[in-house]
Image: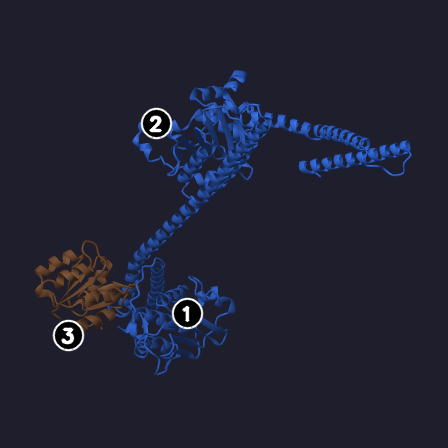
Amino acid sequence: MRSLGGKLTVSAALVLLFCMLLFLLTSWGLLTLYMEHTGRTTVVFHSQRVFLLLLGVGLFTFALGVALFALIIRIFFVRPLHQLQTRIRTQVVENAGAILASDDELETISRSFDLLSESLESESQAMTEQMRSMLIMSDALMSTVNLEQLLGEIVARLGHVMRSKHVSMLLYGREMLSPWAVAQWSEATEIRSTSAIRPPTEMSDILTASQQKGSVTVHADPDSNVTMAVTTKMAAIPNPASGKRKAVRTTQTTYGIRRPRIPRVALRDLDMILARMAIQKLKIASGEDIATIYQQRHDNWARIALEAGYHSVIAVPLLLQDQAIGAFILYSDAPYQVSSQDTFLLSTAAIQASMAIQNALLFAEVKEKNAALERANSLKSQFLSNVTHELRSPLHSIIGYGSMIVDGFVDGELTPQQEEDIRFIVSRAEDLSHLVDEMLDLSKIEADKIEVNAETIELTSSIKEIITQLKLMANEKKLYLTLEIAEDVPPVYADSYRLRQVITNLVSNALKFTEQGGVTIRCTGSRDSDMVRIAVHDTGIGISPAALGFIFEAFRQADGSTTRRFGGTGLGLAIVKKLVELQGGEVAVESIIGQGSTFSLTLPVATSDTKS
Amino acid sequence: MSTPTTRTQAILIVENEASNRILIERVLSTRGYHCISASNGQEALDLLEREPVDLILTDLSMPVLDGYQTTQLIRSRPHLANIPIVAVTAYALSDEGEAAKRIGCTEYLTKPFKPRQLLELVDRLLPAK
């Protein structure tokens, strides 16, 4: 019943029913009247008068029905259609700007519908296009980490999407009176002439967004601590009072705040005034028709804008966590009414832009810090290497001269006390010399200046050779030092010099921390396995479970007190670990307090490939 | 050990540290070796032109001309090709002694060394005549 067609059918059916009923009733009444009048009980149909009577009644009823139907149609259908038509006409005039000839009303209606849908379609298409551009922009912004490139992208894309004549973006740090970064985009034709007069030094600053028409200029202050400005001192000018606007213009040179090195040509007064307005309002500010604004209020900025040939302007603050970090300004050379859709679009763009800027700044900060760390680390290594080198020469003299006296290379006899004192001097100097050597080792390892020349090594012979020297130390402390090695232990692929260092270090450590019993070196492994394990087991004081976790770290001994009791620097195990790892193996430690410790390392088995 | 035995062999000591040079001289002179000193490789090469020498002890890190270069230059002279050269190295992870041997040194001695070690090595390389 809701559709027009349905209504039409129903009303036609009703009128028909009504007419039939009327015809039946009238003809029946007339027939009865006629019968009573003639006194007959049956109707004689061939009587011509009856026929004429029925025909008359029928015609009357038909006429009545037609009149009734026309009336109903007029009231219920034609009038609302008329109303609809006028409404459409006004709409079409409003939207499409076309005035329709009203010759044929139905055609008018259909044409107005066409025009209306066309205009709506183009509007929605434009909107989709803008949204698509925004999406692409957000993608592009998020993937650009170079700050200058990013700023250029933002202004170029905004100008393109919003079809502006000129776009400026200014970024401020907290308490900064002038921006630390300025990015500008202009339509292609205009800037090409300006870029020609630019001095060549500034040409390097110019970045052109490849896929857009137009020219982009970016100035970001390379020497100012931009990262500080944005991450810690982020957010701009905290003076929302409008009375300060004048002060701002005069403070450009008076205060001692560090001014970033943005070329003066890039700092346009108009940009700065408008950016300040947007930043202080924290909302989009717009001048839809600058000529009218100037006529009414005589604003300074409106005058400057008109002189520059702009007739409408939109200033959008860049907000980050409710604080403004800057603003971008869109200029156009014709008056422009800002729609709610524009506002939505621009505020979305602003959020994306400020997030992308923060992103880029954080990235730059991390990169910078990494570089600084690397520099510091290499300086540290260099320093350590220099210092240790300088420390070694005098130590070697002390040890050499001391030994010369003790070993009797000078004339005259020493008293036992004197001899003992000099021995003590020599032995302490030797400790110091070891410490220096180890520091040098570690700094070299950490600076990756260590080369490993791996070769195939027969363990039995090489370890026996290493042990010969260590046996002296064991004998002095009356400890045993034994080697347990199975005959089928395969040769390993390692650096013989490093292997000697590692085993010497582990065994002398083991001997140092053992008072009773001794040290066993155990080699296990078979030709089927990938690695050979060399374990140095002692019956010494053991290591506490807590200390086992960090025993391979540099400068750590199991217990602070052990340094005093046993000497040593705590560098040895760190060096061992690194040397073993450089050769492709691993180190491990097991220990029970009071029963002893086992330090073990693995080395890769020499294969037929490595043998050659 | 302090009884000086007279020998006639001459030893050239190339070392830029004066204290080390004197130490080596004193230890060697207790055995009667005749010691000549040079404080860098260039001086050593000049000296070798003038004086006959039976053994050379050279430090590896020196200004002007370091031990490696000096050794190579000495070995390049035909009349000095077979003279024993002992490299005196400081302890280092990058195995300087072996490197020195590869470029022509006869032996190496790692600092800090005891006088006894020095004498043992020199006596071995220079059998008493």
Q: Colour of chain B?
A: brown
Q: Position of residue A294 (x, y in %)?
A: 51, 18
Residue that badge 1 annotates: A587
Chain depicted in blue: A
Q: Position of residue A240 (x, y in %)?
A: 56, 28
User: Which quarter shows the N terminus of chain A?
Assistant: top right
**Residue at mark 1: chain:** A
Label 1 residue SS: strand
Label 3 residue SS: loop
Closer to us: A392 or A535:
A535
Amino acid tagged 3: Pro
Residue that badge 3 annotates: B127
* Crowding near the residue tagged with mark 1, few <14, some 14–19, many ≥20 C-alpha atoms within 10 Å: many
Q: Position of residue B9 (x, y in %)?
A: 12, 69
Label 2 residue SS: helix
User: Which quarter shows the C terminus of chain A?
Assistant: bottom left
Amino acid tagged 1: Val
**Residue at mark 2: chain:** A
Residue A494 placement: quadrant: bottom left
Residue that badge 2 annotates: A194
Specify the farthest residue to the bottom: A487
Closer to us: A369 or A400:
A369
